[in-house]
Amino acid sequence: MRVGLLSREYPPDVYGGAGVHVEFLARELACLVDLEVHCWGEGRSAGVVRHRPWTALDTANDALRTFSVDLSIAAALAGRELVHSHTWYANLAGHLGKLLYGVPHVVTAHSLEPLRPWKAEQLGGGYALSGWSERTAIEAADAVIAVSGAMREDILGCYPALDPARVHVVHNGIDTALYRPDPGTDVLTRNGLDPHRPYVLFVGRITRQKGVPRLLRAVRDIDPATQVVLCAGAPDTPEIDREFRDLFGELSRVRAGVHWIPRMLPRADVVQLLTHAAVFVCPSVYEPLGIVNLEAMACGTPVVASRVGGIPEVVEDGRTGLLVDMDDDFETSLARALDRVLGDPATARRMGEAGRERAVREFGWDAVARRTVALYEEVVKQA
């Protein structure tokens, strides 16, 4: 089967969970189908075609620039028997490919524009365009993949015109050979951390979705012996960037051992930071699954996360970590949950071991790819 896999992110330009998903899914799919990846970027390599926004739109709204990439991708899909798009950045390309070439279109929904109203802060009027492209593609898709059961409910809630029989759950995966405990500590010392002091770790983008401002307020009052490490970059807007910097400055003035790593680290560095964290924290206000929690679990680290979206399908409350309700007392409850894990190293170690076991047992990418190809075959047969 000749498949076109469509995504904004693809190595080396991966900055979020959807990009990680596409990277590893593509690696496994290439062993099962004739795969061609279409993504943003420059140039062409074996099995990968990169597309850039039209230069005439360099100063235009980002949504229009995205649509120009989608047109370029759609024009290049001739000969594909099925197209599979990821995120609104590529959904329109998949939809146009379906119409242009008469082939099935599969959509994987990693998040939903109606549930991310803060994106209007980043895209302005382009937010209406991103929502339109997502709705158009999802409602017309031959199949929609939800990365969690909670995500499936969200999809059907946002798009009630969609036939529930066309929405399938295929969980995100994790490469447990790459994400595994690393005993080294050179990355810690290179980034100014004290390897003899416990630390709470956050890894993610500076966005409203990831709940970073709430985290910065919550950790003000956790055990003062604990370091706070923020691998946080790619702010959505200048406004959220300024808010983050202000809160980081305030936090640094009231407690010692606060570290901000604003650059994107190599995967091996992130693995080592995950391995040695006393606890990984995920304070997201919206998370269809939360692949970063799987990464932490695969490295043997307990997770404290908000009880939203698909996170409870990954983090087993009381077994691989602790879940915190997203309510008015969230920041206080988050701080107390972090202190519970920090204050009980034996339980934290057991949670970390259970998390690694769960990641290996249930979230391998080879299984994700096989389930995805089985869906492709079903869709093509019905077309």
Image: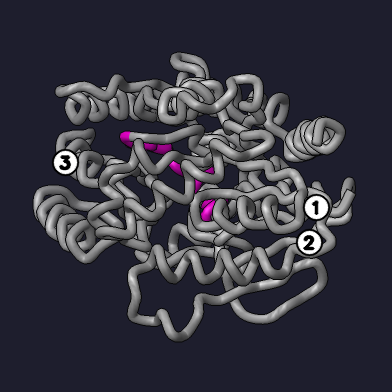
What residue is drawn where x is 81% and y is 57%?
Answer: 80
Neighbour class for label 2 at 10 Å: few (<14), some, many (≥20)?
many
Q: Position of residue 27 (x, y in %)?
A: 77, 53
Residue 308 visible in image:
yes
Magenta residues span 270-285
On residue 3, the disc is 1
- Taking depth in this image into account, of 242 and 58 the one nearest to the observer is 58
Residue holding disc 3:
217
Q: Are marks 1 and 3 in contact (CB under 8 Å)?
A: no
- Point out residue 325 in the picture as x, y percentages from the top left corner: 29, 20
Please name the amino acid that badge 2 sits on. Glu
Q: Is residue 346 at all visible to an observer of this figure? A: no
- Residue at image x 64%, y 45%? 179
Percent from the top left, x then y, of residue 197? 36, 45
Determine the secondary structure under disc 2: strand
- SS of the residue at dot 3? helix
Local secondary structure at mark 1: strand
Position of residue 234 in the picture relative to residue 30 (left or right): left
The span from disc 1 to disc 3 (Cα, nearest Å) is 46 Å
Between 32 and 377, which is closer to the camera in this rendering?
377
Give the amino acid at mark 1. Answer: Val
Residue that label 2 marks: 36
